[in-house]
Image (cartoon, helix red, strand yellow):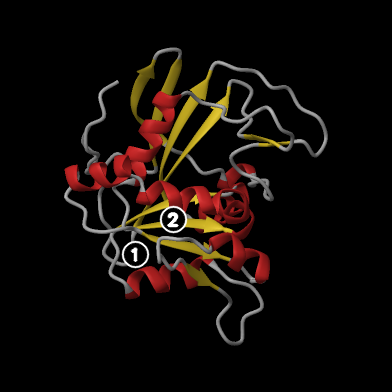
Amino acid sequence: MKLTPFNFPTHADRPYFFTSFVSTIDGKIIVKEKGYWPIGTKADYDYFTYLRGHADAIVDAKHTALQFGKHTIRTIHDETFQNYRKELRKKGFPEYIVLTSTPDAQLTSVLANDHGYEPTIITPKEGSERVTIQHLIDHLNDQEYKHVFIDGGPTLIAQLLEAGVLDEIHLTIAPKVFGSAPGKTLTMVEGILFPPDKVPQFELVSVGKLDDEVVLRYSLSKIHIKN
């Protein structure tokens, strides 16, 4: 599957949000034990990295940042990622944003790096107990960002879906079956069960093949999307 630039729509009042996950056939994206990562192949990781190269900002929730924040910061400074950015005519580094209602020293330590790169931590606004999707949108609009990659995790994805602002999902299906045990596995969305009349409905835009993996591109609307 050849990596070619993606055409993303824009919104007048907020950025266009897109995300990417790799899942087993039985729908698992994370196992809370060693030995199950990575789920996808290097080809899937290249696809994921190329996709993130399109973003003006990359967003994580705190738990995902604690797990993968150092890797994300390292990745966006890698030569491969920077070459993708040049190919896509994107300048500099995307802003790395972490949403959390409970910032602490552990998060600050994880985000420390040798690149002189400063991630942004968005916390609740005055008068609010929790950070919200609107707090994120307000910050992104202030920066005039057009395309924003949502890195994770499953609870943040649930909040974006509930708000109706997750525009696009890229899903790689890896030819694996993990099974399940209580408290050990996660799916792409956690923390909410949508009522039957409010289930987010996406449309299939394209299907790609990476050896034995399948890459599905879904959008809330096919309007203005071209492959």
Residue 13 is situated, as x and y percent measured from the top left of the image, at: 31, 67
Residue 92 is situated, as x and y percent measured from the top left of the image, at: 26, 59
Q: Circle 2 — which element?
A: loop
Residue at the image position 37 percent from the left and 17 percent from the top: 209
For the question of whether residue 201 can be seen, the reply is: yes
Would you say 199 lies left or right of 11 here? right
Name the outermost residue toward the top.
212
As drawn, the label of residue 161 is none
For the residue marked with disc 2, what is the amino acid? Val
Relative depth, front residue between 87 and 134:
87
Name the outermost residue toward the front.
114
Name the residue that disc number 1 marks: 14
Looking at the rendering, in which quadrant would you find the C terminus? top left
Looking at the rendering, in which quadrant would you find the N terminus? top left
Residue at the image position 34 percent from the left and 64 percent from the top: 14
Residue at the image position 21 percent from the left and 43 percent from the top: 224
Residue 211 sits above or below residue 123 on the image: above
Residue at the image position 73 percent from the left and 22 percent from the top: 179
- Neighbours of disc 1 within 10 Å: few (<14), some (14-19), many (20+): some
As drawn, the label of residue 165 is 2
Whether the residues at callouts 2 and 1 have beta carbons within 8 Å, the answer is: yes
Between discs 2 and 1, the one toward the N terminus: 1
Residue 158 sits above or below residue 42 on the image: below
Residue 140 is situated, as x and y percent measured from the top left of the image, at: 37, 68
Relative depth, front residue between 117 and 177:
117
Would you say 22 lies left or right of 96 here? right
**Separation of marks 2 and 1 at Cα, in angstroms:** 9 Å
Name the outermost residue toward the right.
182
Residue 144 sits above or below residue 57 on the image: below
Relative depth, front residue between 68 and 62:
68
For the residue marked with disc 1, what is the amino acid? Arg
